[in-house]
Image: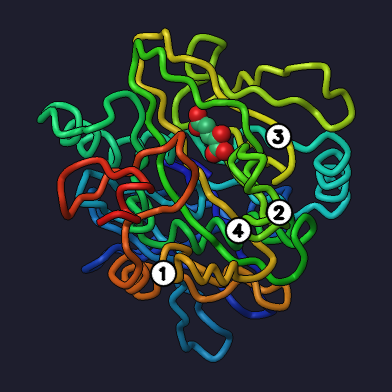
């Protein structure tokens, strides 16, 4: 194909169906089957209207059309971004089984380049103005680490694409029912001596709370840095189940994924670098937490039902953002930015107020 801006899309078309990319308000481009790879199509995006979002449309054998929900979105912060193309599918059964085995034996597993560079920089563009808002106005009660909750849920179809692309792996690790417990961006300020203390996610490292914790015991953390992480940049460390005397520094590239077992000891180091450390954190559980002491803090959003990704479009996400409070009852290493009060809130403050 003689294209100046080729894009790839994976689509399982049936006999007689064809695929078209169509810009909002007009121009279309036919998608052509990839010469070597099944179910992949290429489209020359330079034939589409510049700056406008486009959708993929399946043209059926009878001439009717079905609009696919994955398309390049124009975000307010600047765009467009195609979240579907920006997330790597982990749908190879052999690979997913190997990852699960590693995860259970060691208490963690990494997957490289789950988010593309383009998607990572788009997500950073969503988060950076909020960080500036919190820190530049000097509003933060706690100055070195902030958690921005549900900020990335506003990115259209991001969660849907994540559930669909990582669904087979999540299903393998957690089972056929998967709920999103919480979602947040964590930021550790550049040049900060703040370090997240050694803990296990199941109880936040508080011995007395271990089994009393109501957070789901089988939940799994997914931690995706949005900047490259070297040893100086609030690097996560893990003490593997099978070699607990070791401490592994998890140096990672932006967009790599780290899955953490609920019972593995880990923490993060200071950020002595000159760059704010941004990471996206998602917590998945095989069932809702049903935390009676904090009924609305957990999202309890079904991502997989019977192994199948659920509907997670903008309607669902914005309802969730509206209905769930921004507080998060984690553990006392953390403060949370409460946009309605324009300040940081500690979980203990939340209980008092
Ligand atoms: O992001 C960090 O620095 C620490 C995150 C962490 O330990 C956790 O989410 O459990």
**Percent x, y for residue 209?**
63, 48
| Mark found first going from the N terminus, 1 or 4 | 4
| Inter-mark Cα distance, 1 to 3 | 31 Å
Q: Residue at x 41, y 9 (%)?
A: 273
Q: Earlier in the sequence, mark 1 or mark 3?
A: 3
What mark, if any, has residue 110 been given in the picture?
A: 3
Upstream in the sequence, badge 3 or badge 2? 3
Judge from the rendering whether residue 133 lies leftward or rightward of residue 60; answer left or right: left
Does residue 78 lie above or below 252 as drawn?
A: below
Q: Where is 109 relative to 309, above or below?
A: above
Residue 333 shown left or right of residue 14 in the figure: left
- Mark yes or no: residue 29 visible: yes
Give the labeled residue for mark 1. 296
* Residue labelled with disc 2: 211
Q: Compute the Cα span from label 3 to label 2.
A: 27 Å
Q: Marks 2 and 4: which is nearer the front?
A: 2
How far is the residue under mark 1 from the one under mark 4? 13 Å
Mark on residue 14? none
- Residue at 66% over, 17% down: 249
Q: Position of residue 16 (x, y in %)?
A: 64, 80
Comparing marks 1 and 2, which lies closer to the viewer?
2
Residue ID for mark 4 = 215
Mark 2: few, some, or many residues within 10 Å (few <14, many ≥20)? Answer: few
Q: Secondary structure at mark 2?
A: loop
Residue 255 in sight from this viewpoint: no
């Amino acid at each position: 194909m003689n294209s100046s801006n080729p894009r790839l899309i994976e689509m399982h078309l049936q006999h007689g169906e064809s695929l078209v990319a169509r810009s909002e308000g007009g121009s279309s481009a036919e998608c052509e089957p990839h010469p070597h790879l099944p179910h992949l199509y290429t489209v020359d995006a330079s034939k589409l209207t510049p700056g406008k979002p486009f959708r993929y449309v399946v043209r059926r054998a009878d001439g009717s059309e079905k609009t696919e929900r994955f398309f390049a979105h124009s975000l307010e912060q600047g765009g467009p971004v195609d979240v579907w193309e920006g997330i790597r599918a982990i749908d190879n059964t052999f690979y997913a089984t190997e990852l699960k085995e590693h995860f259970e034996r060691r208490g963690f597993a990494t997957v490289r380049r789950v988010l593309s560079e383009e998607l990572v920089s788009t997500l950073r563009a969503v988060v950076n103005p909020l960080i500036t808002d919190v820190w530049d106005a000097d509003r933060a009660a706690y100055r070195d680490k902030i958690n921005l909750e549900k900020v990335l849920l506003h990115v259209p179809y991001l969660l849907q694409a994540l559930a669909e692309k990582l669904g087979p792996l999540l299903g393998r690790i957690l089972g056929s029912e998967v709920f999103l417990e919480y979602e947040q961006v964590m930021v550790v300020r550049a040049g900060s001596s703040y370090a997240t203390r050694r803990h296990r996610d199941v109880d936040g490292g508080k011995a007395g709370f271990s089994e009393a914790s109501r957070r789901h015991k089988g939940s799994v953390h997914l931690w995706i840095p949005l900047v490259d992480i070297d040893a100086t940049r609030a690097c996560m460390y893990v003490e593997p189940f099978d070699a607990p005397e070791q401490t592994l520094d998890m140096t990672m590239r932006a967009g790599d994924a780290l899955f953490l077992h609920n019972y593995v000891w880990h923490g993060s180091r200071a950020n002595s670098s000159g760059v704010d450390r941004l990471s996206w954190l998602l917590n998945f559980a095989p069932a809702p937490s049903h935390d009676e002491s904090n009924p609305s803090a957990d999202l309890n959003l079904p991502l997989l039902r019977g192994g199948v990704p659920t509907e997670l479009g903008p309607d669902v996400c914005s309802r969730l953002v509206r209905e769930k409070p921004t507080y998060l009852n984690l553990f006392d290493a953390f403060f949370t930015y409460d946009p309605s009060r324009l300040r940081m809130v500690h979980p203990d403050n939340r209980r008092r107020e």
